[in-house]
Amino acid sequence: MNVEHLKLFVRVASTNNISLAGKELGLSPAVSSAHINKLEEGLGVRLIHRTTRRVSLTEEGTDFLPHAKEVLASVELAQASVGSGSISPQGTLRVTAPASFGRMHLIPALDDFLEKHPNLTLDLRLSDSILDMVEGGFDIAIRNSSLNDSTLVARKLATDTRILCASPSFIRQYGQPKSIQDLTRKKCIGLMGLEDWSFDTPNGPQLIKPNNVLRSDNGEAVRDACVNGIGITICSVWCAYEQLREGELVHVLKDYPLINNTAIWAVYPSSRLLAPKVRAFIDYFSGVFGDTPYWEKS
């Protein structure tokens, strides 16, 4: 079984386009089609449905895909174990991450990461939507959430402290909230997907529905709206640390901390083998963020 044929098949499964997948690997459309044909002939099954507009996996192709990925990971580990005796990440690493976190905290560190690993290229997809790792062909997903999917393996990269914020201009105009119940009356800004706010109080957890005058699906947009005095909101410290340091935002209701079980996770499909490129990325950013991430430091 030809390793290059497997690489092409995995990319075809992600792009649904043989020519595009081949182009990514430096192959012409004719050579790409021939490689897929040879792979199917060797296996004795059809892996791909072909139409004039796109391709899709057959049932056999869907079943074969995870095995193809595992073979490629095994080959990469075997290649890395010989020669210098050290693991040298190579190839293309496909990563998906939340848009705001990726822009603010991944991209500024990528120059150093890629300099340390010159044989590695990176495809980075920034989206606030939760993208399917297998369907998208991603090696790693950075998730800012609680982690409940037992089919995935994850490593915690950093804490995600969330606080209640308001701008000085909002406080001057409307006053500080004095109790959690004030949030049902004062103007608030909501992040879509976080409809209720949960607080740790002397009387136990308390859940409230804020008086949202604005909702957005983007954390930076929510933060900026708060800076502009539109209302009170929940901010992750990693998103608002600069505004807090500059005094553009103020931490309010400090005596009532938010209940939050989210963190920044690096998630990858379950496998008994961890590709060197995946390990390199996770180890690097674990070091960048450390036990106490720089955005948590005063």
Image (spheres, helix red, strand yellow):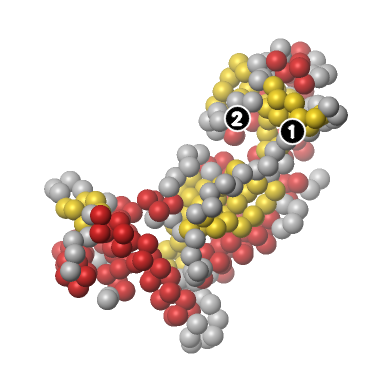
Q: In which quarter of the image is the N terminus?
A: bottom left
Furthest residue in direction left, as rendered = 52
Residue 149, above or below 113: above
In this view of the protein, which residue sits in the foreground, 124 or 286?
A: 286
Image check: 110 left or right of 68?
right
Q: Where is residue 85? Give x, y as percent.
A: 54, 85
Q: Which residue is drawn at 81% across and 19% down?
A: 179
Q: Which residue is drawn at 65% across and 16% down?
A: 211
Q: Quadrant of the C terminus?
A: top right
In this view of the protein, which residue sits in the foreground, 168 or 7?
A: 7
Image check: 171 left or right of 40?
right
* Callout 2–callout 1 Cβ contact below 8 Å: no
The disc labelled 1 sits on which kind of residue? Answer: Leu
Tag of residue 75: none
Residue 50 at least partly seen: yes
* Circle 2 crowding by C-alpha within 10 Å: few under 14, some 14–19, many from 20: few
Q: Where is residue 237? Give x, y as percent.
A: 71, 40
Residue that carries the numbered disc 1 in the rendered image: 258
Helix or strand or loop: what does disc 2 sit on? loop
Residue that carries the numbered disc 2 in the rendered image: 194
The disc labelled 2 sits on which kind of residue? Answer: Leu
Residue 281, above or below 164: below
* Circle 1 crowding by C-alpha within 10 Å: few under 14, some 14–19, many from 20: many
